[in-house]
Image: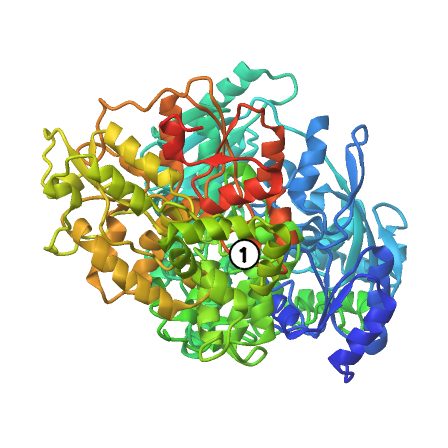
Amino acid sequence: MSTVTSSDIAAALRTAVAGEVDDSDRRRAEYSTDASNYRVVPRVVVAPRGVDDALAALDVARRLEVPVTARGAGTSVAGNAVGPGMVLDFSRHMNKIVSLDPEARTAVVQPGVVMSDLQVVARPHGLRFGPDPSTQNRATLGGMIGNNACGPHAVAYGRTADNVRSLDVVDASGRRFTAGAGDGALDAVPGLEKLVSANLATIRTALGRFKRQVSGYSLEHLLPEHGTDLAKFLVGSEGTLVTVLGATVDLVPMPTAPVVVALGYPDMPTAADAVPALLEFNPLAVEGIDARLVDVVRRHRGPAAVPELPPGGGWLLVEVGAQPGEGAEEVLARARALAAAGGTDAAAVVPAGEQADALWRIRADGAGLGGRTPAGDPAWPGWEDAAVPPERLGDYLRDYTALMADRGVDGLLYGHFGDGCVHVRLDLPLETPAGIGPSREFLEASADLVARYGGSLSGEHGDGRARSELLGRMYAPEVLDLFGKVKTLFDPSGQLNPGVLVDPAPLDADLRRPYARPTPPAKGFAFLEDGGDFATAVHRCTGVGKCRADNSAAGGFMCPSYQATKDEKDVTRGRARVLQELTNGSLITSWDSPAVRDSLDLCLSCKACSADCPTGVDMARYKSEALHRGYAGKVRPVNHYLLGQLPRWTGLVTKVPALARLSNRALGFRPLARLVLRAGGMDPRRQMVTFAEERFSAWWRKRENGVPAGPERRARPDTVSAPRAPRAPGAVDASSSARAGASPGDAQRRAVLWADSFSETLDGDGARAAVTLLEQAGYTVIVPDENACCGLTWISTGQLDGAKKRLTHLLGVLAPYAANGIPVVGVEPSCTAVLRSDLPDLLPEDPRARMLADDTYTLAELLTAPAPLGPGPDWVPASLDGLEVVAQPHCHHHSVMGWEADAALLARAGATVTRLAGCCGLAGNFGMEAGHYETSVAVAENALLPALRAAGPDTVYLADGFSCRTQADQLVGRHGVHLAQLLTGQR
């Protein structure tokens, strides 16, 4: 390796390239790992703006003898996209589709183009790129070319190699050429044709034996009978031979009249036995799914996420589409014939539509959720995508599952069974160095097994650092020697992606997880779901990068800051990497490190990742904990004292109505408001909040004075029952009101309306409307005599001591009601989410915390619950027929409670709802803080602002969140209403 310093390398690069050059500890931490088990800290990260930039950066690396690793989305599960020298991130700027020729069915792309973006551009022409890995909405074409990615439809369309026509590349010597096929194609690399000619027998017998033999170099493409195709050979070389600057790829017609056939079998090996017979029907895809994986999807996404499947312990999902000359009826007939040939009576034929889409979503969701075992333990890559010839798949799976059982290893099986490719993540004991030896032994045994079946260590993800060392168990010495000679022709000094394929690093070197230090609680969050260990919590992030994708089309909210900036610093994964490095303690050493502060700065604490991330990363919680520890005993930023303790100040101001009126009048004077905003660490372009000139509690007391009140309406229960078992996410405990003393025949049901600090001191309209709505639904509404703050703003700014103090007081106010089975209804979604999510983890030793969390509901959850908890079928919401509604679910509502009950209630009322996906951008204190305004507005431009601009004047903007209403009001002057207001006619 070069002896020059990282600073010298960065200085030379900044002189040579126009793109970003960053050698900071934070940036190096963000790129120290991909989606694999490995941690290799680079010396510098470069984001070239174009081909000239990339060539200039490579020239500097060559001159200074710095290793080079090319990187796209960083979703490699084998450690292909990490390296010790310079990492070239092509996804940041070199992400253009240069041209698309519908007649030739080709596209010219830069290496950073996201695969799904190419699909969007090709779709109007009736075309698509054939391979479609599960990461297609963030995977780049450059990465797919590097690994020879495939996906479910490779059965019909082949691997990436089969869909690449030519490549614009540069090798380690700086030689740039276009890799193509045919006579003279090998002249671009002196000595290559001679090497191939001298090893024809080895290449013909050892390589290209079946379609998914991806491990090693695919030299079979250089054979004359295969067209002497240099481009296809370079696909799958994992950045070890050339750096890809551009590609011309083939496109294929989109399938028409697709039909899904679901086939159930007793187990996965039996399902695999049926595959060869099904391939005779020329399917588009043949996917295998384990019943345990379906159970995980059902638990994580809810029962509605899993449509009815035929009976079985494992399934094949087979897709067939129209062949030339076929119509929909012929395809359906072929699908029925395929089902009859499947060797099972458990079959369902599903034409294109919602149910077919739902079946494919099981497979897509399962691919991410496989990162946890059914018991909830971490499951790691490392043996992610082995493949065997399809006709041997059943027997291989029997032996492999027996090996897993013998070694005490668990994992969820799924994969591309039509190609013989099996995906599984394993609960290898990688939490400590003591588990490295047993993990190595299992992987070596797995390699020996797949070799006995004539298979490939990798079927689509490449060998990387995870499997390159094992190639000697699959290939004879002469094959490995041939690989080494090929490497020498392209990269004689071993500069390109060292440690991969040739001269491999040991598979147990540079592992990330074993060397993270245990990080027990420090009077903040308990991290109960992660064994009380912050290090375990942040290592939930395995790097699959779903947070880099725009998930809004599927209703996802993650990750709003990345969608605004497209910078790895501002994505959930990048932040997790920095916090993982903090637990490692060698690159980032302290909680108050600038790297930690900078990484977390643009996190909106929206909690979207807690729901949308397949491994359940909760960056909002991690940020709060990091701020709690980083500022312990230190002076905080002024906005922490102002915005972070907002309920304290709004409570003081609104305690005296005259003071609230005076404050509103004074702060309506913009010069004074700007001065106050600046002094408080806020952006002067924002507006100050408006204080309630009549608190909700004062309104309630006035109302009660005019209404006869029985003791049940005002009194607080004095007894506390034993805590109940927690309800499952999204489930409604219909027995609550029975415990409250209301039998199913009672005319009145009781509900506690909890007016949080925002509803009490800033905007009480939603709470007042909720009282009316609940009474209309037949409830006796109880409002506690004492105000109770959940400490939300203290939590978001990491002031966890203050948050615990307020939550302890809140338990004294609300827990007695929950103990007696009286449901507590929240008004503000973010505060309701605190009770449902953060409360039990901040006060884990107080049994009242879990009890209250289980008895807290949103308004819609209560009103859609079955009787006796809900109002029952006799209650019908006011008609909203003909009303257009733009609905902005609060991020915490989406992430913690889910918005399905709200959607059902609005549908029952007859409203036509446009449901937005994504954060509004204000996110509590985030959008108010100095330095966040531009990002806040950019996030709002993702969905909220375009939807409001397009909405008609009579369209209602529905937003339960105070932040969501404030953002729309301040940016476009659009007034928003709470669900309770909408359903009581207050529009």
Q: Residue at x 41, y 50 (%)?
A: 658
Residue 786, percent from left and from top: 24, 54
In depth, the one of 105 and 267 nearer the eye is: 105
Residue 184, percent from left and from top: 90, 50
In depth, the one of 200 and 5 nearer the eye is: 5
| Image quarter hosting the C terminus | top left
Q: Quadrant of residue 240?
A: bottom right
In depth, the one of 196 and 365 nearer the eye is: 365
Circle 1 residue: 926
**From the viewer's perspective, is residue 468 above or below residue 106?**
below
In depth, the one of 171 and 113 nearer the eye is: 113
Say if residue 758 shows up in the picture: yes
Q: Amino acid at mark 1?
A: Phe
Crowding at mark 1 (Cα within 10 Å: few <14, some 14-19, many 20+): many
Residue 833, percent from left and from top: 37, 51
Q: Secondary structure at mark 1?
A: helix
**From the viewer's perspective, is residue 440 above or below residue 261?**
below
Residue 410, percent from left and from top: 37, 59
| Image quarter hosting the N terminus | bottom right
